[in-house]
Image (cartoon, rainbow, N blue to C red):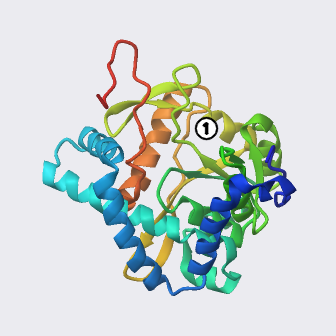
Amino acid sequence: MGNVSQTRPQFRMQLLHPRYWLVWLQLGLFYVFSWLPVALIDLFAEAVAALAWRKNKKRVHYASVNLALCFPEKKPEQIARLVRQHFSYQMKSVLHYGLIWWAPRWRLQKLVQLQGAEQIDAIHAEGKQVIALTSHSVGLEFAVTALSLHYPCSGLYKAMKNRLIDWQVARGRTRFGVHAYTREQGFRPLIRDTRQGRVMIYLADEDLGAERCVFAPFFGVQKATIPVLGRLAKQCRAEVLPCVSCYDAAQRKYIVKLLPAIDALEANDDAMAAMQMNRAIEQTVRECLAQYFWTLRLFKTRPPGEASVYG
């Protein structure tokens, strides 16, 4: 769909091409789900998750390796239980996407609860700006929704390969006024927005390769880490609040938490800032351990001389 602008992405006629008809059918199912009680969606998600857990051996392997590396004190049966729980939470969050895309504001306000927002107000009252440091939890999209329901926000957007899915996801993210920019547009418009008072939603735990990352410990394992957070905070005169979205299956709602700001974030030493950032992300991961995206190849890029951890 090309670059995502500050407004909601525009529909294009090529999205009606027959190659997208199956995707349209799938989106129709998500629309139906958006009208169902969350308890019923979760019941269906459990069945699909059980099938995915049995069939997707590759992702089960990635998750098992990641958890064993990060938590060597855990027994194999504990790791296996966390992996199984992760698939359950992941499938629930996927089937909840229709709610983000189509549910009325009043229903979303019941579905998502934002905690720690008083920190944003206090930081703005001091004349400073806010960066919400997010990571790949299964409820990430609900963190975006929760923040944008209460504050003007901006963020970077990674375009998806399927143009119809890309268009739909972008519509969901910008539904409540989020300014979304592609990586090709770079940080400049994002920095400008943040200086003007928008909350920057910054997704920081991607592995972009050794050329664009530094290595910093993540739960004691060296991880290729994007090293720009300290400089971003300095340029925006912003405080960085770690942010995580945890699905509470008992309450059937997402609890989006803003944790205390990173203290004395280093702006002139990328390696130190990366270490501080990963430490903050670790805090968010511990809030709902099974809901972090353990099925990703978190340690894909290895330091020189180290072999792949995934075999």
Which residue occupies the foreground of this view, 22 or 67? 22
Identified at 57% across, 66% down, the residue is 142
Residue 125 relative to residue 89: left or right? right
> Residue most toward the front?
18
Residue 134 appears in the rendering:
yes
Q: Quadrant of residue 287?
A: bottom left
Q: Position of residue 253 (x, y in %)?
A: 48, 78
> Residue most toward the top?
305
Residue 276 versus residue 124 in the image, above or below: above
Looking at the rendered image, the quarter that the C terminus falls into is top left
Residue 6 appears in the rendering:
no
Q: Where is residue 200 in the image (x, y as percent from the top left)?
A: 69, 52
Identified at 82% across, 57% down, the residue is 9
Categorize mark 1 by other alpha carbons within 10 Å: few (<14), some (14-19), many (20+).
Answer: many
Which residue occupies the foreground of this view, 170 or 43? 43
Residue 250 versus residue 52 in the image, above or below: below
Residue 138 versus residue 224 in the image, above or below: below
Which residue occupies the foreground of this view, 118 or 106? 106
Q: Position of residue 116 (x, y in %)?
A: 55, 68
Q: Quadrant of residue 148?
A: bottom right
Q: Label 1, secondary structure: give it.
A: helix
Label 1 is placed on what type of residue?
Answer: Leu
Residue 309 versus residue 20 in the image, above or below: above
Disc 1 marks which residue?
229
Identified at 56% across, 42% down, the residue is 204
Which residue occupies the foreground of this view, 1 or 157? 1
Q: Position of residue 42 (x, y in %)?
A: 42, 77
